[in-house]
């Protein structure tokens, strides 16, 4: 059974890149009638905030993504990470350095995996230094906690950004040492600006919450995000969520980065507005204006519907 996860850190709001990663995971689970899970990577206690977590969860729901099990919080699992780390010391796979626990990387080996998007990737352990599992302050490192959690959550497919490709060989070494089953990996190319660099706030890397406040429809945003690096073929651009779920396969994701185009997103949003049934559009426009304190409660509904139909 397909089990995937989205693992946000509540140290900021959900932005376009992370939302697309979550969407690709959710679509893959839905397409294969599997499970989409959430893991909250909140080990950075100083920067993790409840307001960020609430916004992330709210944005996922607004974009139609749901999850079948209670989210896993890493901050509540420190004892579990410590137990596994101690076990690795007992096995002779790790050593202590003060209060830290460090994994010994055997040199002269090849680590490889078959990425679902990029194909075979191979790395020499000569290029990997010993890996810290537990820091001196008692907190786990990303790679160690990630492996332990993915195993205990029974994750079958790890779908994440290709900035994590360098982490995967390090994690595979841990899977092999603990004799854990190794999941399938798929690394999604990053979203680029029109100029070709990494997406920044100036180019559109604002939070999903901001897009919602600007009047973008969730249907349009999901459609646009799905097409950032994936295509159903036949040059089709407007697709219902049901169609996307039916056609989506992470193996079909492009190997190169997708370009974010605000003009294209705005065009697509306009298509959804023009094609939305009047009753649904009336409700969305009314709620949007009321939430922005632009509109009161006393309106002539018949006249209001006519106004919307003119302007849409």
Image (cartoon, rainbow, N blue to C red):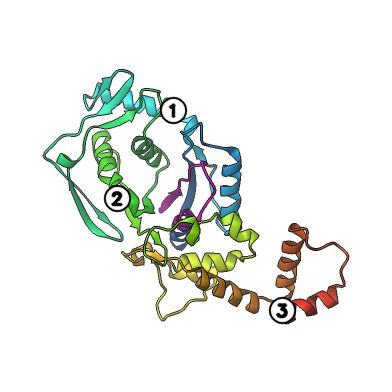
Residue at the spot of label 3: 311
Residue range (magenta): 1-21
Tell me the crowding category of disc 3: few under 14, some 14 to 19, or many 20 or more residues within 10 angstroms, Cα based: few
Check residue 11 in the rendering and tell me which mark sits there, or answer none. Answer: none
SS class, disc 3: helix
Residue at the spot of label 1: 78
The part of the image, by quadrant, that contains residue 84 is top left
Q: In the picture provided, is 114 more to the left or to the right than 268? A: left
Rendered location of residue 168, percent (x, y): 29, 46
Q: Residue at x 35, y 26 (%)?
A: 135
Tell me the crowding category of disc 1: few under 14, some 14 to 19, or many 20 or more residues within 10 angstroms, Cα based: some
C-alpha separation, residue under disc 3 versus residue under disc 1 = 55 Å
Q: Residue at x 56, y 56 (%)?
A: 208
Instruction: Point out the tag, 2 or 1, that comes first from the N-terminus.
Output: 1
The part of the image, by quadrant, that contains residue 248 is bottom left
Confirm whether the magenta stretch covers residue 7.
yes
Rendered location of residue 68, percent (x, y): 54, 49
Residue at the spot of label 2: 165
Q: Residue at x 75, y 63 (%)?
A: 289
């Amino acid at each position: 059974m397909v089990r995937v996860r989205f693992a946000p850190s509540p140290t900021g709001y959900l932005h376009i890149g992370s939302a697309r990663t979550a969407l690709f995971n959710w679509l893959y689970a839905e397409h294969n009638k599997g499970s989409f899970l959430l893991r909250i990577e909140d080990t950075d206690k100083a920067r993790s905030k409840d307001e960020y977590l609430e916004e992330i969860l709210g944005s996922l729901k607004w974009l139609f993504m749901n999850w079948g099990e209670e989210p896993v919080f890493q901050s509540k699992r420190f004892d579990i990470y410590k137990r596994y780390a101690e076990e690795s010391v007992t096995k002779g796979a790790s050593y202590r350095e003060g209060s830290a626990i460090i994994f010994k990387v055997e040199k002269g080996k090849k680590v490889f995996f078959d990425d679902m998007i990029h194909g075979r990737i191979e790395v020499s352990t000569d290029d990997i230094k010993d890996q810290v599992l537990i820091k001196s302050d008692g907190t786990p490192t990303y790679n160690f906690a990630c492996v332990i959690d993915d195993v205990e959550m029974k994750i079958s497919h790890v779908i994440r950004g290709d900035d994590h490709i360098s982490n995967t060989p390090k994690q595979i070494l841990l899977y092999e040492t603990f004799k854990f089953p190794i999941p399938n990996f798929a690394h999604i190319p990053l979203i680029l600006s029109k100029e070709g660099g990494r997406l920044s706030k100036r180019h559109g890397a604002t939070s999903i919450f901001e897009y919602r406040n600007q009047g973008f429809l969730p249907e349009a945003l999901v459609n646009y995000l799905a097409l950032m690096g994936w295509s159903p073929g036949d040059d089709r651009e407007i697709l219902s969520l049901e169609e996307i779920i039916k056609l989506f396969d992470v193996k079909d994701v492009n190997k190169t980065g997708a370009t974010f185009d605000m003009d294209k997103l705005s065009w697509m949003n306009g298509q959804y507005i023009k094609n939305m049934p009047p009753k649904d559009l009336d409700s969305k426009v009314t709620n949007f204006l009321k939430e922005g304190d632009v509109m009161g409660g006393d309106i002539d509904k018949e006249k209001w519907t006519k106004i919307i139909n003119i302007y849409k």
